Image: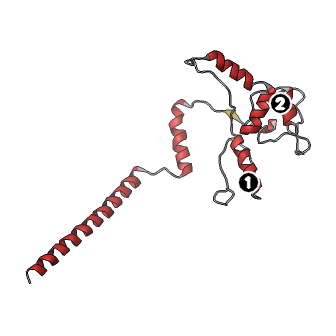
Amino acid sequence: MTKGNAWMNVSWSGDAQWAIDEASEVGVELAYLVPEEGSNVWFDGWCIPKYAKNTKAASYFINYMCMPENAIYNMEEIGYVSVIASPEILEWADDEENISETADLTYFFGEGAEAVHANQVFYPDRKVIDHCALMHDCGAETEAMLSMWNRVKGDNLSGGIVIFIVVVLVLIVGAALLSVFNRRKQRALQRKHRKNR
């Protein structure tokens, strides 16, 4: 995007913030927007698979990562928001020096977070979140959604188009092979003609 090859991209907020930071280093300004119609809500969480061999160590790791100071270090390193909504995280998120706009983050932090100077890539305002929803398994509708997405991406080739492309490729390959065969045949005739002289 910094080279102008794309003007828009669907991205998770952490990846978007990384791109925004990288672009600013080369003098390009990028923005992260959620459509007015809404989007999906996502979150990263730590979990232990039921087949894990060392659940005690996994629990220690999760507890360690959920300590506010470690959650902050992790957020700073990977660029994704923690699932922790502690006062320390709220204090870290409130950046009045660098951010002039405020956001209502009561949906995440509860009372006292009505006007936080937060990076809205990480913590969108309640008005944005109210237009969003969690993704879920669409069951029988999944195929229709995938078909719609393929049309949006432009890779919705119909069966007739695929057959046409295959036939054209076969004709091209056939013509190339016929040309090679005719050249070899012509050379063989020329050699035979030279021998007979």
Q: Residue furthest top?
A: 56
Q: Which mark is residue 23?
A: 1
Q: What's the residue at 74%, 38% (across, down)?
A: 77
Give the CA distance from mark 2 to mark 1: 26 Å
Label located before the other in sequence (2 or 1): 1
Left or right, residue 32 beside residue 96: left
| Picture layout, residue 2 above or below residue 63 | below
Within 10 angstroms of label 2, few (less than 14), some, or many (20 or more) residues? some
Q: Quadrant of the N terminus?
A: bottom right
Q: Quadrant of the C terminus?
A: bottom left
Q: Amino acid type of disc 2? A: Ile
Within 10 angstroms of label 1, few (less than 14), some, or many (20 or more) residues? some
Q: What's the residue at 81%, 38% (across, down)?
A: 125
Q: What's the residue at 77%, 33% (across, down)?
A: 73
Q: Amino acid type of disc 1? A: Ala
Q: Which mark is residue 171?
A: none
Left or right, residue 53 beside residue 37: left
The front one of 189 and 162 is 189
**Residue position marked by numbered label 2 in the rendering:** 89
